[in-house]
Amino acid sequence: LRTAGKAYYNEQGKGVYIAGAVLDITEHKQDEIRKNDFIGMVSHELKTPLTALNAYVQLLQFKLKETGNDFTTETLEKINVQLKRMWLMIDGFLNVSLLESGKIQLNKTDFDLVDLIKTIAEENRVILPSHFIQVIGPEGLIVNADKEKIGNVVNNLISNAAKYSKKESLIAIKCEKRTGEFVVSVEDEGIGIKENDIPKLFERFFRVESLITQTIAGFGVGLYICAEVIERHRGKIWAESKFNKGSTFYFSLPTAE
Ligand code: ADP
């Protein structure tokens, strides 16, 4: 039950009456929980056929490596790009549902941050041959974090950098050590973001309203999840951007003690 009210006072400052409303939100809350569980269940189930599809495409790519022609190679590459997009979207919904129900847990281990980023960049070079992906950073930056979830954050930032920029442009990833923290940045030469949209980027379901973004698939959950994951690691996430020039997304993680 939620109540909202206002007290009214007479000229001597004595309370005379209270006007208010009592609203039953239990039903509404349960509806939200049911909706959230449903989204979680559907996205979880959709992942199974998608994983199988992915495996079949990889099998075909392997089989056609020697005998395939340019057309089959290119078509399979395109299928791969779309599969990855679909995977990221479904994974996004699943993660939002887990976050909302408080079910997300961190599985922390010690690992080399730059090593992880280099592996992810390599995977993305295969999936996103349209862009140049560069990684700069010293090895041996050891963090105590959830490797899979941090990997997803990096993947999301690279995927956005590619989505919101032209083919053949550069995506530069830098890692550096500062006092007590490591900072990772993902810079693109893309469409950029207007100053007044920057504070809203990490809100759930936020998408910049423009003719270009309307033509690019997305639900505005990727950055919201990135922010939740990084904040749960006691790190920070932020963005800098110049409209029509490009954007840089940053996140920091505390150094392992
Ligand atoms: P999605 O890309 O699926 O819409 P995100 O949460 O990842 O969702 O991003 C939210 C919004 O922020 C995007 O819709 C887009 O408008 C903007 N955005 C994110 N990354 C970039 C980028 N690298 N360059 C320009 N705009 C971006």
Image (tube, grey):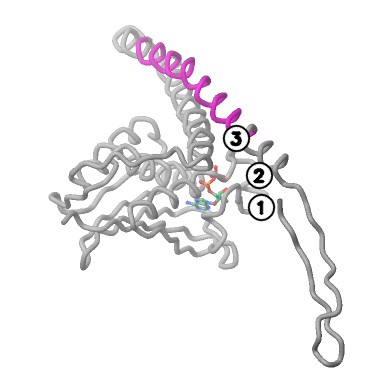
In-image side of 138 versus 63 (left or right): left
Rendered image quadrant of residue 116: top left
User: As rendered, which of 190 and 230 lies closer to the eye?
Assistant: 230
In-image side of 165 versus 129 (left or right): right
Q: What predominant SS class does the magenta segment belong to? A: helix
Q: Quickly name the residue at label 3.
A: 36
Q: Quickly name the residue at label 1.
A: 210
Q: Which mark is residue 214?
A: 2
In space, the residues marked 3 and 2 are separated at their CA atoms by 26 Å
User: As rendered, which of 63 and 70 lies closer to the eye?
Assistant: 63
Label 1 residue near ligand 1, CB within 8 Å: yes
Secondary element at image label 1 = loop
Going from the N terminus, do you reach mark 3 or mark 2 first? 3
Secondary element at image label 3 = helix
Disc 1 residue type (three-letter): Ser
User: As rendered, which of 88 and 138 lies closer to the eye?
Assistant: 88
Q: Position of residue 50 (x, y in %)?
A: 47, 19
At horizontal 61% and vertical 53% (from top left) the residue drawn is 208
Disc 2 residue type (three-letter): Gln
Residue 42 colored in magenta in the image = yes
Magenta stretch: give its range: 35-59
- Kindly check if marks 2 and 1 are in contact, taking CB atoms under 8 A apart as contact: yes
On screen, residue 64 above or below 178: above
Going from the N terminus, do you reach mark 1 or mark 3 first? 3
Q: Position of residue 230 (x, y in %)?
A: 37, 52
